[in-house]
Image: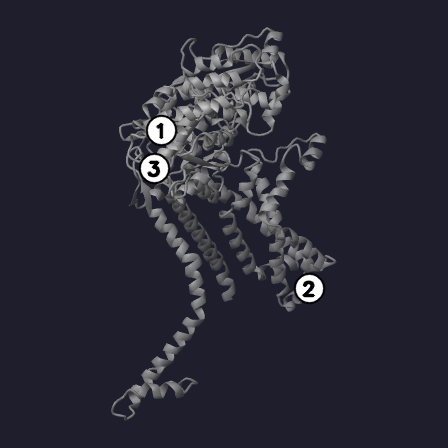
Amino acid sequence: MSGAPSRRGVLAAGLALPAVGALAGCAPDRPRPSGGRGPTRITFWSAIRGSQEVVDAFNATHDRIQVDFEQIPSGTQGGYAKLSNAARAGNAPDVATLEYPQLPGFAIDGVATDLTGLVSDRTRDLLLPQALERATFDGRIYALPLDIEPMVMHYRRDVFDEHGFEAPRTWEDFADLGRAVRDRLPGDRITVFPTDGGTQFASYACQAGAQWFATEGDTWTVSLTDAPTRRVAEYWQGLIDDEVVFANSVGGPQYPAQVGDGTVLVRLSGAWDAGAQMSSHPGQKGLWTVAPLPEWEPGAGVLGDHGGSTFTVTRDSRHREAAMEFIEWQVSHPDAMRARLSAGTSSAFPVVEELVEVARRALPDYYGDQDIYGLFAQEAAKVRDDWVWGPRMTSTLNLMHDNFARAAAGRGTLVDAMRAAQDGTTPDLRALGLSISEREG
Amino acid sequence: MGTGAPPPAGPTTPHTAPSATSPDPSGTPRPPRRAPSGRRSARRRELFACGLLMAPFFALLTAVFLVPVGTAVWLSLFADDRTGLGFGPPNPSFVGLRSYLAVLADPTFTAGLGRMLLFCLLYIPLLVAGSLLLALLLDSGAVRLRAWAQMGLYLPHTVPGLIAAVIWLYLYTPGISPVIGLLSAGGLNIDLLGVDTVLPSLVNVVLWSNLGYNTVIFSTALRALPRETIEASVVDGAGPVRTALLVKTPQIRSAVVTVVLFSLIFTLQLFTEPMLLSQSTSMIDSRFSPSMYIFDAAFNRNSYGLAAAASVVLLVCTIALSYAITRWTGRAAGPEEER
């Protein structure tokens, strides 16, 4: 693997950083060495693999700031609860990791703070605009994105070639192909409708033009059952009813088995899943190809995303400048990317162009001669910049999962599931004191 | 107590009398005043003794019940309010009944409450009928090695609910469960954690844990019964079944009511078993029972006001149902006991 940090790169980082520090130094609250002449110490929590390597690389090249890293469980496995509780007790870390869907909730709870004044113009220019937009609410920046993951279609090219299937361009083609797979390859299905994949479903709805949450003036509009969402829900419901797709959870052991034994021919997921596939199914090397997600209207050029993380400075941080310097380095410095990739294969799509190059070069040979990063870059440009996640998204997604599972068991439909998610979400938002307007678009 | 006469000299009077009269500056005893003051003082002592003896109870009641309930009510009336979109500094403010309205308008909470009532309808009759049957069998003498049987029945109760759930989770999960394996080998495919089967499966777990315990309660009540009544019924020619159903059972009625009441309270607060089973089936969601709703509101949705309001609603429901049951059974028992 070519992802190990090079010595020259580490040295270059040491040279490049004072420039960032100088820019950040314009703001009043400069990091001061705590307790005399020692470096400023900041704490960092993350569940992202490779974070320890990133922190080590940062500490090796920085004298004024030293980062203490703590690996925490992933968000839904308790990481977010840990962060909330720490913030309530007043000892949240300086830098915390949040995924896009959870960012608004933590911003409303005051854990993720307004970073607008801390972000340097240089960094702002480096970041992919639609990714930064996801971290901006009411005109204020609450986090800096690390990666954005456009939805793509991963498919078994060997099976497609063998049976003369073509990669579907539209959802109609996709459904037709699904029926062909069901009829011609007994036991196999084109894909899985993930009953625990609320974020996948969100990205389908996003692509179709849905707007589940929006901020209009002082009001949150909630419309989890708007017309585009109903269209997507009815489409997938039809595929489930006709047994064109499997409908099961993808978090458990069942899904890797389905992929591994070849009963599932297509995976619809974010760009990162290409790397996850390499690690979990090394034996399928050369069998998979990545293509753009099917569209409702050919050439519409609109896409949703699936996955991706951001970093924020919490309200308990007493070294906000130093924390921001670390975040900026993490998301934009090539050495940070090299260090991250040294921990293992990843195909996450970074939001800084220079890092895409680093990631591309580090990628092991699995997809033959396909330039998957070229495809990701092309698809990332289509990701909608006006998608907004809700203020209690973990809970909304849980409600969706609960009801998707029921729908898959023949109890209610996916449209009912979205209605139930809306009905279960609004009381939470009202209890927060937010002004809410429900809309069925 | 009469109005005019002084109280008979109890053990307290020798001590109270001098102390009651000594402050009198004239030194002359005044009998008419002495009696009421002595009585009052005796009463005060009585009250003091009562207070002293009941103080631990009230201290505990306050510490473990009133203070937490008060805190919950207090929490439920306040919130870190955010105006408009919510991206401002929090503004801790009094929100009145807003959290209560949100809880009561939340279909996931009311559905959880309804689910637990359904659970009660399944669980309590099975529990009472099952443990009563076992207790009557043990008491009838039809069972040999009664002590051993009783212990065997009681053993599951000593297994913590968490472990019980793990054991049953193993037996319920397709692929690892030998029971499901055997059944499917016999051509019977059943998903014990499916959309319709999950509630009965859960009832089974709880029943397994609690059946023996309640059998012991019933057995103890049966053993305390006056043997004459049973002898009388035998002399009158009642068979063992009639004796059990018509003589013994009515006499342990209060034990049955207690068991129903405790089971109801236990069910409404059900948490551990569904929480653990939810790891394995998506048919148990994160707000399956009211207690899980409260946990989810506090720790996943970070909304303490909502969690507190839901706790108070649950408490009120529990108290109301318990009261209704005691009133209803009390009234039904009333005429019989008067006769």
> Closer to the observer: label 3 or label 1?
1
Question: Dot 3, crowdedness within 10 Å: few (<14), some or many (≥20)?
Answer: some
Callout 2: few (<14), some (14-19), or many (20+) C-alpha neighbours within 10 Å?
some
Which residue in the structure is indicated by mark 3? A430
The colour scheme used to paint the residues is one colour
Label 1: state its secondary structure.
helix
**Is B232 placed left or right of A114 in the picture?**
right
In front of the other: A438 or A4:
A4
Residue B307: image location, x then y, percent? 41, 44
Q: Residue at x 31, y 88 (%)?
A: B21
Q: Is residue A277 left or right of residue B294?
A: right
Name above or below for residue A178 compared with residue A136: above
Under mark 2, the amino acid is Val
Q: Type of residue at label 1?
A: Gly
Identity of the amino acid at label 3? Arg
Between the residue at mark 3 and the residue at mark 1, the CA separation in whole angstroms equals: 42 Å
Disc assigned to residue A21: 1
- In which quarter of the view is residue B193 placed? top right
- Foreground mark, 2 or 3, reads 3
Label number found at residue B234: 2
Where disc 2 sits, the SS reads helix
**Residue A359 x %, y %:** 49, 19
The quarter holding residue B240 reads bottom right
